[in-house]
Image: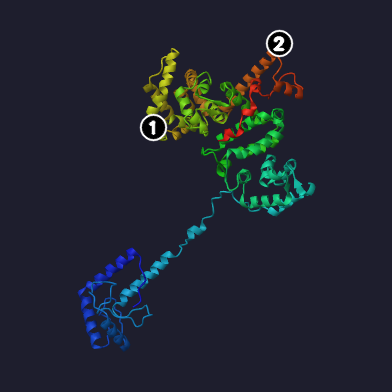
């Protein structure tokens, strides 16, 4: 007797249960006993329409009867209550060893098994619905493909440009024309050059470039994905900080608004470091240190890159490339870095803005919660790259990144919620500073009521990051708890002016842009005053100042020149890679 199809465990239990119920029925046992007597006597079995519940008839020929008697003589009988076990005297044999269909009363059981097998096979078939076929593709991680893109036409334009170069090879100086033929912004030229292998050979052949650009067009369908593909390391679909260095070095070397920096090459790395930190500050919203295509699409960085070609004054591009902003940030860092090793400790940072920030907050900054350099926590030192994040966040607490920055610092237990204990922890030092200034501090209970009314948290007694971003007054909240100078400024302001500031938010210069413009004017005025003092006392300019003045024909220091104190820096001790760890 061939073995039946193996059933699924749950389904087999149900079949066994039904078989036992059928076999235990008195009517079934009576019928089976009569059939057994007929088989023993060698008489044919004829089933009527009313003998069995399913009203089917089965007939056996003489060969079946002989075979059944032979099988019964060889096998021991088994109890009727044992399903699918050793065949008993009441089990009818099959007609042949190769036939899977059984005859007799047990044929019904086997038919159930076969139907179960069919059901099992049916469930394994893939189910396709009309609904799934009607849903169009909506996720395009590399950008939505352009329907009418003529790749061959673009390639022919590129080949025509390369035909103008000797041996159809393009150097870095020729890549501006190639970038335009690729319909890319001008300052994509170095990413295009390096992606085609030009950084290794010093030139790019037409065949290598065409192969690279064709592959890029077939796999990347928008500017963000193309830019990431060109700058990223092989096998990566994101950008890290050091991926931007060749691109930004070309901007420094070739942009007319930065031509004066050619006379101070040692400060190229400082400017590049500043721009890279500002790019990640504004674009890398996930705080991973890896800029993805999605984050690049949501930002306006590529629009600013395109504007570099049109805008000769980089100071107009205040979000990323402004030299004035770099000047302010670096001067502020230089003032705090008393030993000029390009690192500052807690004591140095406490001197920022005349010790306005509380010591508890400074300790939190150095705890590593908002810094990427591991040495900040291990060695207690803050690099220039991390200082860029600190200064922008300190001077403009209205942006999403700055709110996240200070929220991380205040969330002592890292549970994503600012509890009343954490607010009190920071406010205690504010009270001590106010008392030292002979100002009676507001009791914490009253201050807490004001802060809760200001933020209006969704869950009572728990302030979340979402609450602070929604309330539009996070800068007042943070300054109240850890910046004494700005806290007093807010207290002296007209309450209605705060409301007006909220209503006009985004319609004027940001707090950071206002701060950078004011500080730049102050620094330039101080530098001009120092020049006048040098003229009165007949003290010569620093070597760098003399060099720039003589080259540019200036009687005074150039408007963009590095401040005089910077000239005392031992540039050989500066390691550029440290800023990106």
**Quadrant for the N terminus in the image:** bottom left
Q: Quadrant of residue 198?
A: top right
Is residue 117 rendered to the left or right of residue 307? left
Q: Residue at x 22, y 84 (%)?
A: 37
Is residue 115 rendered to the left or right of residue 190? left
Position in image of residue 456 (x %, y %): 41, 30
Q: Are marks 2 and 1 in contact (CB under 8 Å)?
A: no
Relative depth, front residue between 511 and 355 = 355
Residue furthest to the front in view is 573
Is residue 544 rendered to the left or right of residue 128? right
Relative depth, front residue between 60 and 77 = 77
Q: Residue at x 52, y 39 (%)?
A: 288
In this rendering, the label closer to the viewer, 2 or 1: 2
Q: Earlier in the sequence, mark 2 or mark 1?
A: 1
Position in image of residue 213 (x %, y %): 67, 50
Residue 151 visible, this orientation: yes
Label 2 sits on a secondary structure element that is helix
Disc ID at residue 462: 1
Relative depth, front residue between 133 and 518 = 518
Residue 319 visible, this orientation: no
Position in image of residue 94 (x %, y %): 33, 81
CA separation in Å, label 2 and label 1: 61 Å
Is residue 400 rendered to the left or right of residue 445? right
Q: Quadrant of residue 555?
A: top right
In the rendered image, the vertical position of residue 349 relative to residue 63, given as above or below: above
Disc ID at residue 146: none
Residue ID for mark 2: 536
Relative depth, front residue between 511 and 547 = 547
Other-residue count near label 1 (Cα within 10 Å), few / some / many at <14 / 14–19 / ≥20: some
Label 1 sits on a secondary structure element that is loop
């Amino acid at each position: 007797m061939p073995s039946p199809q193996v059933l699924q465990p749950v389904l087999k239990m149900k079949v066994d249960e039904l078989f036992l119920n059928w076999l235990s029925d008195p009517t079934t046992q009576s019928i089976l006993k009569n059939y057994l007597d007929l088989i023993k006597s060698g008489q044919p079995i004829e089933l009527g329409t009313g003998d069995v519940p399913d009203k089917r008839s089965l007939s056996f020929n003489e060969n079946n009867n002989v075979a059944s008697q032979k099988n019964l003589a060889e096998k021991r009988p088994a109890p009727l209550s044992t399903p699918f076990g050793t065949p008993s005297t009441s089990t009818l044999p099959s007609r042949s060893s190769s036939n899977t269909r059984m005859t007799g009363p047990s044929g019904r059981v086997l038919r159930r098994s076969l139907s179960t097998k069919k059901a099992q096979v049916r469930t394994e078939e893939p189910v396709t619905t009309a609904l799934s076929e009607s849903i169009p593709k909506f996720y395009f991680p590399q950008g939505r493909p352009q329907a009418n893109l003529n790749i061959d036409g673009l390639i022919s334009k590129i080949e025509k440009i390369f035909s103008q170069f000797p041996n159809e090879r393009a150097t870095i100086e020729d890549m501006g024309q190639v970038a335009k033929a690729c319909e890319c912004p001008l300052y994509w030229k170095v990413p295009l050059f390096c992606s085609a292998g030009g950084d290794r050979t010093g030139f790019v052949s037409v065949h290598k470039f065409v192969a690279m650009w064709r592959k890029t067009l077939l796999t990347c369908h928008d500017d963000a994905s193309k830019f990431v593909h060109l700058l990223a390391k092989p096998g990566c679909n994101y950008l890290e900080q050091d991926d931007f260095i060749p691109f930004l070095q070309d901007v420094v070397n070739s942009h007319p608004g930065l031509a004066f920096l050619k006379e101070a090459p040692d400060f190229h790395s400082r400017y590049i470091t500043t721009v890279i930190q500002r790019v990640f500050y504004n674009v890398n919203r996930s705080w991973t240190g890896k800029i993805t295509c999605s984050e690049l699409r949501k930002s306006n960085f590529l629009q600013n890159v395109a504007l570099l070609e049109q805008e000769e004054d980089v100071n107009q591009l205040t979000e990323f490339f402004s030299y004035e902003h770099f000047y302010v940030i670096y001067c502020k860092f230089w003032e705090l870095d008393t030993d000029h090793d390009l690192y500052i400790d807690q004591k140095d940072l406490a001197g920022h803005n005349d010790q306005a920030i509380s010591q508890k907050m400074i300790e939190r900054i150095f705890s590593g919660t908002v810094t990427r350099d591991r040495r900040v926590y291990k060695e207690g030192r803050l690099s220039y790259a991390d200082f860029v994040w600190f200064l922008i966040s300190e001077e403009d607490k209205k942006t999403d990144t700055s709110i996240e920055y200070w929220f991380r610092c205040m969330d002592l237990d890292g549970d994503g919620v600012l509890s009343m204990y954490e607010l009190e922890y920071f406010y205690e030092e504010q009270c001590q500073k106010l008392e030292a200034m002979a100002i009676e501090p507001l009791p914490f209970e009253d201050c807490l009521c004001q802060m809760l009314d200001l933020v209006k948290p969704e869950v009572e007694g728990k302030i979340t990051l979402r609450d602070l971003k929604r309330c539009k007054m996070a800068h007042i909240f943070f300054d109240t708890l850890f910046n004494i100078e700005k806290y007093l400024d807010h207290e002296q302001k007209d309450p209605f002016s705060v409301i007006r500031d909220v209503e006009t938010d985004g319609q004027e210069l940001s707090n950071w842009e206002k701060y950078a413009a004011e500080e730049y004017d102050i620094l330039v005025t101080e530098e001009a005053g120092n020049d006048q003092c040098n003229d009165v006392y007949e003290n010569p300019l620093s070597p760098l100042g003399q060099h720039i003045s003589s080259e540019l024909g200036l009687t005074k220091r150039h408007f963009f020149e590095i401040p005089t104190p910077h000239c005392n820096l031992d540039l050989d001790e500066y390691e550029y890679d440290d800023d990106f760890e």
